Image (cartoon, coloured by chain):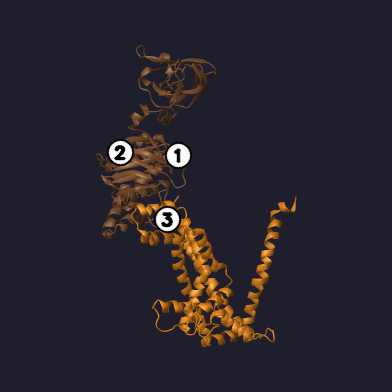
Amino acid sequence: MKFADREDLLGAAMLGPALAYVILLVGVPFVLAIMLSFSSATAGSLTLTWAGFRNYSTILADPIFLRSLRNTAIVTIGSQVLVIVLATAAAQVFRAAFHGKRAARFVLLLPWAVPVSLAAIAWTWIFDSTFSVINWTLKVTGLLHGWLYWLGEPGLALFAIIIVQAWRIFPFATVIVLAGLSSIPQDVVEASIVDGAGFWRRLFKVELPLLLPVIAVAVLFGVVYTATDLGVVYILTGGGPANTTHVLPTLAFQRGVLGADLGQGAAIAVFLVPFLIVVAVLMLRVARRAEIGAGGGAR
Amino acid sequence: MGETSPGVEIRQLRKRFTGGDHDAVDGVDLSIREGELLVLLGPSGCGKTTLLRMIAGLEHPSAGEIYIAGRRVDQDVPPRARGIAMVFQSYALYPHRTVSGNIAFPLEAARLPRAIIAEKVRWAAELFGIAGYLDRYPRQLSGGERQRVALCRAVVRDPQVFLLDEPLANLDAKLRNTARDELKRFQRQIKRTTVYVTHDQVEAMGLGDRIAVMDRGKVRQVGTPHEVYEDPVDTFVATFLGQPPMNLVEQPGGGGRTLLGFRPEHLLPSDHFGDREPLHPIPLIVRRVEYLGSDRYVYGTVEFAPEATVIAKLPANIGRAIPEEEGGRLDFAVPERALCYFDAQTGERVRR
């Protein structure tokens, strides 16, 4: 028997590299991070001396940490709400037949393909305190009378971060929603038309409920991408002004790497894990329940 | 502009899909009477579903006119305002809504008060015997039950016209018979104009007040089941209806210009007919005999037209003694009154 015929060996051989990749680049650092978070290690001395929960109690008493925790939640939830609304609308547009649809699709996907750091640098110019195109546009159209310091005021800066995160995730979500839309049986949509449902009723009473599992998956991805993203905030605001716009990844980087307190940095980074696990489980459950609900209904 | 039927009136209706090279519906004129059940019957791809969808407003005609209850609808009346209800082949139930949610959907869309909606849902569910399933989801129902839900959803709208697109096609054979019977009783009861699309001639014959036989976008013949079966206007209708289909052979001495048509059940041993009956003798060379319980099919060729296969359908009590070996010659005949003549070139019926 040839090697290629041995499904057991072949399977192991093909899974091996992927497994090794996950273990070495995700598993080991993850375990290491948890260990570090319970140690008093610093960048200078990588000794794992047991520190108990000291790192955790330190950060929990730290207003900057609490603020960054809140920021992470605001940015994640805010951007995902924006993403769902935009992606649903865009999917409706892209479902229609129009000239230049392919080109438009290509352009739509660009934000997804651009490296985060490059995109963030471009956005720093869009939000620039002097040259901001948003400000100048608003000014010219007469909608703005004062001046917006996008990255200079904590509230506006957070809003700017939300915009960039939404801009980054939204193409991906649109593609997912489009795929979901095309999986809705045409008959069901036509039945609702004959039954007298207008656009909004069709959208909210037929299409969105049937899209729920797909949207849940899109949101799950979006939450994970946004909550764990370092680049956007790091480049846009660097956590400023005055540490008001930190999210957990930037704070972890600042404390753990720049501040050399590896233990505390690890504690901050690991802090999110239980929350993300809960989000993932919830979303997958919604997806599965809705799938059972839709399964076999139209046949 | 003549009088329009109070049912559905279709004039010179055409549909060519973008990029298509022929008309899916090719100049159809059809007058559907108020209260009748008209079946659109034809092979797949003949345009019957496209025609139905144009009546529903789900497809926009390329040319022609559609009137529902005397009102022209083809230009700018959306499906919801046409006074129609449609049952899809797949039933197209809303999978995320319960049975009662499904039935209530068109009523909610019409913004009726809640109490009235609940009342109508209950009435329809009782009409179709599914009042016990109101809280279930479509996935928890059998095919027959889903079909009833789809019918309920159509009935509650109180439409002027029902449009049914192969509503029995997804049921298994056993259920189809009972469902057909129920459908007919229901239609008699509510006496509402109904257009019923099917490719199944048994359904068409059993259900239709009239049948419109379609082929390649055109209506070939409209008539009662009896008319289209006994009096077909061309060879297409003659061979599409009937199981087995009508036999067609060249007329002897006709120079190949005329085809003789006769139904398998009319081709019987000559000695079976009475002396007074004018007969057309069809000498049959047996190829094979199929025993089917209540009937036997005799497959063979006719002596004077050996290239065409003909089938004789013998009831169990007739010709029991006929020799069944291959190549045997049988003295069969068809009564003159049961013969149809067709033009061999055009396929059209020749009256004489």
Q: Colour of chain A?
A: orange
Which badge, 1 or 2, is on the more N-terminal residue? 2
In the picture of the structure, the residue carrying the numbered disc 3 is: B95
Find numbered disc 1 in the image and state the secondary structure of the residue it sits on.
Answer: loop
Query: Do discs 2 and 3 share a chain?
Result: yes
Looking at the image, residue A72 sits to the left or right of residue B315; the answer is right
Q: With respect to residue B43, does B297 lie above or below?
A: above
Going by the numbered disc 1, the residue's amino acid type is: Ser
Same chain under badges 1 and 3? The reply is yes
Mark 2 belongs to which subunit?
A: B
Q: Which is more N-terminal, label 3 or label 1?
A: 1
Q: Quadrant of residue B109?
A: bottom left
Q: CA distance from mark 2 to mark 3?
A: 36 Å
| Mark 1 belongs to chain | B
* Marks 1,2: beta carbons within 8 A: no
Q: First in sequence, mark 2 or 3: give its number.
A: 2
Q: Amino acid at mark 3?
A: Pro
Q: Which label belongs to residue B44? A: 1
* Element type at mark 3: loop
| Residue drawn 58% across the image and 75% down it | A117
Residue lying farthest left? Answer: B3
